[in-house]
Amino acid sequence: MGIETIRVVVADDHDLFREGLRQLLETVPMIEIVGEACDGQEAIQLVMSQQPDVVLMDINMPRLDGIRATEYIVKNYPDTNVVVLTMYQDDEYAIHAVRAGAKSYLLKNTKSDEVIEAIKVAASGGATIDATMAPILMREYQRLLTRQPNEKEQLLTEREMTLLKHLAQGYSNKQIADHLSLAESTVKNNLSALFHKIGVRDRTQAVLYAISQGLVPRPSEHQQQH
């Protein structure tokens, strides 16, 4: 019985890095690159058309970033596993990636054989994390695994739901204030209270929370292109 081929999409906005990854992966008989994307939207479109086993996903890309692309792919294409491969050695980025559903989080200075191994592990449903990021990510994985169902989302007020929807649409505090006929300081205070209530620290986490709980729609292709 032959080894099953792992079908991979590479998503990165740096042409040279993407080309280097392709050349590396083409040397591995069991890995087949079925598409390359230079932003999150292209990554999603490739997943839709190619149904790959693994996506190697950068974080900082134009049009749609890797975090939101990961969230969309994980929700809609659960058989595709995302490996984040990034230059960001930052707790916040790592936590956002894990919350979005990434299987693995690796830095771009990771050794070639470790990247190849991470792809194989992800294809089988396993996870790999960069050693320098291990402590923070293990805590986050544990938090997600032990998180009890709660009624926070049902306890949100109509105002709080409106704030989440505006955040998801990318509104600034001033735009929210204008839209709701409130003082900007009131909006800031309301957002601080909302973040504390749902257990997040910033606007990005609040939007990810709202999307993951089904409180706001996922970002559409149309929304991301303007």
Image: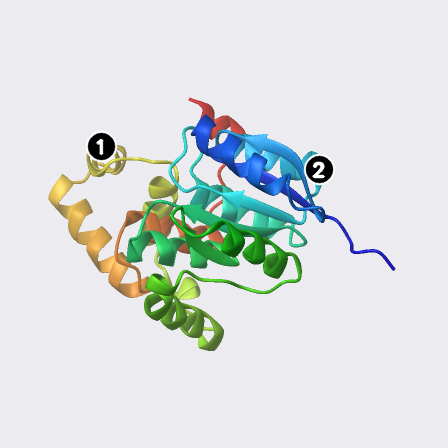
Nearest to the eye among marks 2 and 1: give it.
2
Q: Position of residue 96 (x, y in %)?
A: 38, 54
Q: Which residue is mark 1?
A: 178
Residue nearest the viewer, comparing 14 with 92: 14
Q: Residues within 10 Å of mark 1 (few under 14, many from 20)?
A: few
| Label 1 SS | helix
Give the residue drawn at x 57%, y 35%. 23
Q: Quadrant of the N terminus?
A: bottom right
| Label 2 SS | helix
Amino acid type of the residue tagged 2 in the rendering: Gln
Give the residue drawn at x 33%, y 67%. 136
Q: Left or right: where does residue 30 sit relative to residue 181? A: right
- In the rendered structure, find residue 50 and report the number of the disc placed on it: 2
Above or below — where is 50 with respect to 158? above
Give the residue drawn at x 66%, y 46%. 28
Q: Residues within 10 Å of mark 2 (few under 14, many from 20)?
A: some
Give the total of numbered labels. Answer: 2
Residue nearest the viewer, comparing 197 with 126: 126
Q: Quadrant of residue 141?
A: bottom left
Q: Quadrant of residue 60?
A: top left
Is residue 183 visible in the rendered image? The answer is: no
Amino acid type of the residue tagged 1 in the rendering: Asp
Q: Position of residue 107 (x, y in %)?
A: 39, 51
Tell me if label 2 and label 1 are in contact, CB under 8 Å.
no
Q: Position of residue 129 (x, y in %)?
A: 44, 62
Residue nearest the viewer, comparing 23 with 162: 23
